[in-house]
Image (spheres, rainbow, N blue to C red):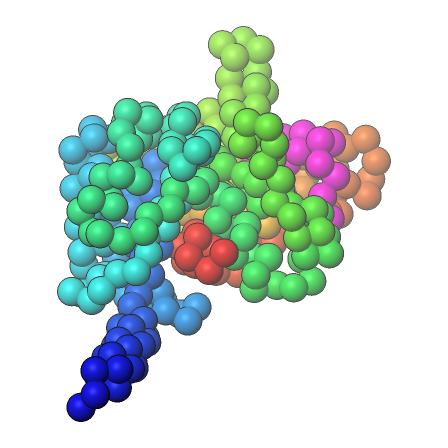
Amino acid sequence: MPFFQFLELGYFFTIVYNKTMAKNDFKIGVDIGASKVLAARVKNGRVFASRKIYFENRMKQYILKSIFAAIDEVAGGKRISKIVIGVPCVVAGGRAKRCFNIPALEKIDLKKIVEKKYGAKVVIMNDTKAMLRYELLRNPELRKKRVLFIAWGTGIGSAFADNGKIHEGQHGLAGEIGHSIVCLEGMGELEDYAAGKAVQPKEKTKWLQEVLQNKNSKRAKLIFKKLGEGLGIGILNAIYHYDPDIIIIGGGLYRFLPYTLSHIRHVLAENALIPEISKIKIRRSSATEDAGVLGAVLG
């Protein structure tokens, strides 16, 4: 075989091999919350496997152990082309700069650590912006509206989009309402009154399921009232700042919305400057817990 024909044949097989490997490549989306990590193997917009692991504690070694375990399980030995990690932090320059509920992430270069372990491209982004990104990708009509997305869980994250563009702001804080000061005494933040950590029993990670299973109990109704009124105050303040057309609730506590919405509406009706505010559209996220990993990977 002439040398140049040999080179052409080799080039052909290289292209075929690369295309075949690309078809077998998977992307991994990782959503790190204040109390857990969720990893999912994604291909062509579909989740093929997912794994959720609750942190034993929030020390660096335990967080990394949980992240690696979740990734390893969903990867299933397959080649990973890209890993996108959503973190509950202010993100700048590809690093977590300020992590209010999981400060250990501030002290490590997570991107570099994960790249070294898996040999894949790694991207770090804010988790709530990833969730909002998925909503915009899935629902084209939202790209023509002003949308406030609230990630309601152990803490509260939020992000804002106008006509399909997610606002970042000069410091990556645009749309962030969870750390708004709502009480001057003690400088209490919205999270302190309206997030899961305001009612979650210490050392319990699956308390949410217990509340839902006993949703008609006196305790559950008190929790729904407390969180609904707290979130209602945060939503009212956010409406004054962003004047959204729609508010979407995601995160771990999104399942509480049917039981808290009346309390949220009551706060709006009693305190809004104009009555139209109390009728603003509020709905649950269409992708529940997958929104973060899908938005991160598909965006």
Instruction: Please tell me which residue lies in front, 117 or 181.
Output: 117
- 238 inside magenta stretch: yes
Q: Is residue 294 left or right of residue 83?
A: right
Which secondary structure type mostly characterizes the magenta part of the structure? Answer: helix
The residue positioned farthest toward the front in the image shown: 2
Residue plotted at (67% across, 42% down): 265
Q: Which residues are magenta?
A: 230-245
| Residue 192 image point, x, y percent | 46, 24
Q: Is residue 61 left or right of residue 184?
A: left
Residue plotted at (54% across, 39% down): 158
| Residue 28 image point, x, y percent | 31, 57
Residue 246 visible within the image: no
> Against 48, is 202 above or below?
above
Instruction: Please tell me which residue lies in front, 196 or 160.
Output: 160
> Against 249, is 95 above or below?
above
Q: Quadrant of the N terminus?
A: bottom left
Residue plotted at (43% across, 33% down): 93
> Against 238, is 54 above or below?
below
